[in-house]
Amino acid sequence: MAKVKLQSPKGMRDILPEDQRYFKYILKKSDQLLDYYGFERIDTPMVESVELFLRSVGESSDIMEKEIYTLKTKGGDMLALRPEGTAGVVRAYIENGMNVRPHPVKLSYWGPMFRHDQPQHGRYRQFYQIGVETIGDSSEAVDAELIFLGYKLLDMLGLDNYNVHINSLGDSYCRPGYLKALKDYYKNRSKKLCVNCKNRLKINILRLLDCKEAECVELSKEAPQTVDFLDDECKSHFKHVLEFLDEAKVPYILNPRLVRGLDYYTRTVFEFLPDEENSQASVIAGGRYDKLIEVLGGSKTPAAGWAMGIDRVVLALKEKNVNVPEGLPKPKVFLVQLGEAAKRKSINLYESFRKAGIEAKSSIGRDSIKSQLRIANRLGVRLALIFGQKEALDGTIILREMDTGVQETIPLEKIVDEVKKRLKN
RNA sequence: GUGCCCGUAGCUCAAUGGUAGAGCACUCGGUUGUGGUCCGAGCGGUUGCCGGUUCGAUCCCGGUCGGGCACCCCA
């Protein structure tokens, strides 16, 4: 068999130890915030039936048309790697009869998502999201709270350069009227559209609005806007959401051309984009999806939510040089062990430092004192403890101040206290 | 999926149409059980992979895989 160099699949990468602290940091902050706001954690499978996404995300969405990872089981079921989190959470809500819980049901999740897309800066085929869903409440306050939380979370993470772009898509009562107006508008102008948009005209007309082709952008400027077609209820809903945001001092930008790539959104849709102009790297996106639960077989239940791209947040944290805590606390003490007897006794000694809450390190496999002290030095510990044959026999240990090289022999039973004392100064 | 750029040791890079080096990193040593600086040694690459041109290719050509960027789209 030919030796083939193994590598991770395209667009999928390893998250190495030195990057784990970013994930830890982001997850910790989001837990702090979301716990307080009453979001309960839910985990759903990374694989679901294709049908679920077909019905939720939408057949004509790019996700279903070209990005979905599908697989056939040995039993013949068609499954898909989840491209996003909401569908699975809603499925779980219905399947587990969560409609009998007090509403709204507030759920949060995090985990890998999969899209077969062309990898690029901040875009991977396996990427990580944190998401929240508030199910069973149609009020404006929910939309506003979600947006506020997104804003707050970014702020807590040390990212304050994001704006909320917001729009309302209307609902099943008023959207048809809008879509018709849009269709009429484009009907006479279809010749000017790009190839893609000509296709969109038939399949998913809303998406014409966020095409980036120059001619299409030009046309969309004059196109009818969703807000002008909202019925009274939708209009009032949108207005109130904005009022809430004003009150909460969340800066937002009304963007009539903001539509989302997923079919299930109704009324409020929003995206968090960085300040820089023309940046498309949205880091949080979401909206209201009052129809989705019905579509997936539940009873009529309004809901809203968002998802945050963790990988993009990590990039932003690095770019902004945000101070992210080390993954492991810096060790204060290094335990040098020489010879069998010392190594045997070291296990308990090491453990007594852990119990005392003192960060210690050792390198149990190494024999020479030289290489062990080298490591101690590299780790930047303040104290080295030298524990050899002789000391193991005498029941003592040598305590060395790394800065000065000054050493002292201490009775073994007093060493933890002595280290504690010295670390205080 | 499309276009442009890229692919030499873990990292950063060098080199020549005749099969490759440096720095850093890593391991070890420089007196018996003592680090940082210094010195020395070692480890480490079928030059991403496959094929073509050639007497000969890491360098030329094609393909492929992977990466970067832009587009499409999106978190």
Image (cartoon, rainbow, N blue to C red):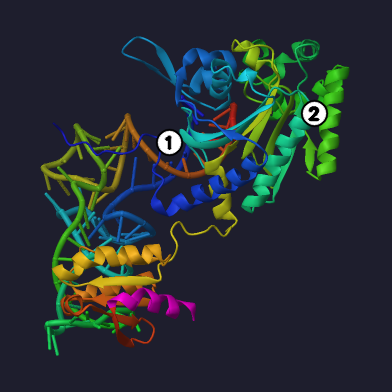
Task: Tell me where the magenta segment starts and ends, as one range.
Answer: A412-425
Residue shown at the point (14%, 68%) measured from the top left: A340
**Which image quadrant is residue A140 in?**
top right
**Label at residue A11:** 1
Residue A213 in sight in this render? no
| Residue drawn where x is 48% and y is 59% of the image | A326
- The residue depicted at 57 percent of the width and 13 percent of the height is A55
> Would you place residue A17 above or below residue A110 in this image?
below
Query: Does A309 appear above or below A262?
Result: below
Picture quadrant where residue A401 is located: bottom left
Q: In which quadrant will I find the N terminus of chain A?
A: top left
Q: Is residue A118 left or right of residue A3?
A: right
Residue A424 magenta = yes
Image position of B37 (left or right of A164): left
Q: Position of residue A179 (x, y in %)?
A: 76, 13
Do marks 1 and 2 both belong to one polypeptide chain?
yes
In the image, B13: left or right of A207? left
Name the spot of residue B16 as percent of width and height, x first.
Answer: 24, 57
Is A49 in front, or is A315? A49
- Of badges 1 and 2, nearer the viewer stands 2
Where is mark 2, residue-wise?
Answer: A140
Three-letter code for the amino acid on which mark 1 is drawn = Gly
